[in-house]
Amino acid sequence: MAGKTKTKKKKPSTYKRKTSQAKKKTSRDKISKKSIILVIISLAVIALIVAVAVISGGSAKRESRITDITKDTAWGIDVSSHNGKINWKKVSKKADFAFVRVGYRGYSKGEINPDPRAKANIDGAIKHNIPVGVYFYSQAINPKEAEQEAEYVLKKIKHYNITMPVVIDFEYPSKNGMSIGRLYNAKLNKKKNTEIINAFCTKIRKAGFTPGVYASSYIYRWHMNMKSIPDDVFIWVADYNEKVTYDGYYDIWQYSENGKCEGVSSKQVDTNYFYTKKRLQVKK
């Protein structure tokens, strides 16, 4: 460090003039500091009030930002034709909700196909008062195809009381541990993938349903721009670790693909935690 420098003493006249001005400035500074402190305190109080309102139910979206399993957590399954015939009466005794696949796009030629058991599954779940959501297995490689998928889903559910989110299932199929399919082969960047998600969700929203997206933690981290996905879109994450490794916001956690549920004829079924039971009320 440099040594201290010797300073010259100021003349008395200069000192007195400066002191006179300084008194006025000091007075103003004191008022200014008090104002700043009051503003800070006020903002802190407002933030506390907002936080309390959110926790007490002021915002269902923020309420679902829970990272630990709690007594208010709902438990449910998601099914497709791969799960075979389902006894929904038995399922209703175990599951708080269910997601049903209504269709899928082929990962080779890109054709849209119905799920053979979609109608039976939706009818069965609704009959036994299980809140139902639906999903479509996407392989869309552009927004136009995503809109086509959304329109297909809307035609399938237009006569049903779907109270849970309507979801685009965005994932890369795999074979022998390697990703395959038209979506993977398209090598789209984060921006393009997110445009596909938003195109599907926009169609669903405009039709009066709640939009959602399903993907793995890996895809959310590396293949989507989450900041560009609207807040009203439900985030459903698949992660089969002890906890979700995606560190962003999510509503639903598919924690196992090897689960069990009485009434489901297949040996295994996807099982999920949903973090806000308040959204599961069946509309009468």
Image (spheres, rainbow, N blue to C red):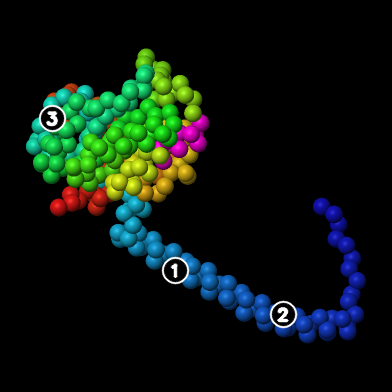
Please give the label number shown on residue 86. Answer: 3
Report whether residue 241 is seen.
Answer: no
Q: Residues within 10 Å of mark 3 (few under 14, many from 20)?
A: many
Choose between 7 and 193: the one closer to the eye: 193
Does label 2 or label 1 sit earlier along the sequence? 2
**Secondary structure of residue under mark 2:** helix
Image vertical order of residue 54 relative to residue 77, above or below: below
Choose between 163 and 1: the one closer to the eye: 163
The reply, left or right, for residue 160 in relation to residue 214 is left
Kind of residue at disc 3: Ile
Q: CA distance from mark 3 to mark 2?
A: 79 Å
Main SS category, magenta section: helix
Kind of residue at disc 2: Lys
Kind of residue at disc 1: Val
- Residue 10, by quadrant, is bottom right
Q: Residue at x 12, y 40 (%)?
A: 92
The reply, left or right, for residue 42 in relation to residue 35 is left
Q: Confirm or deny contact between disc 3 and disc 1 (CB under 8 A).
A: no
Quickly name the residue at label 1. 45
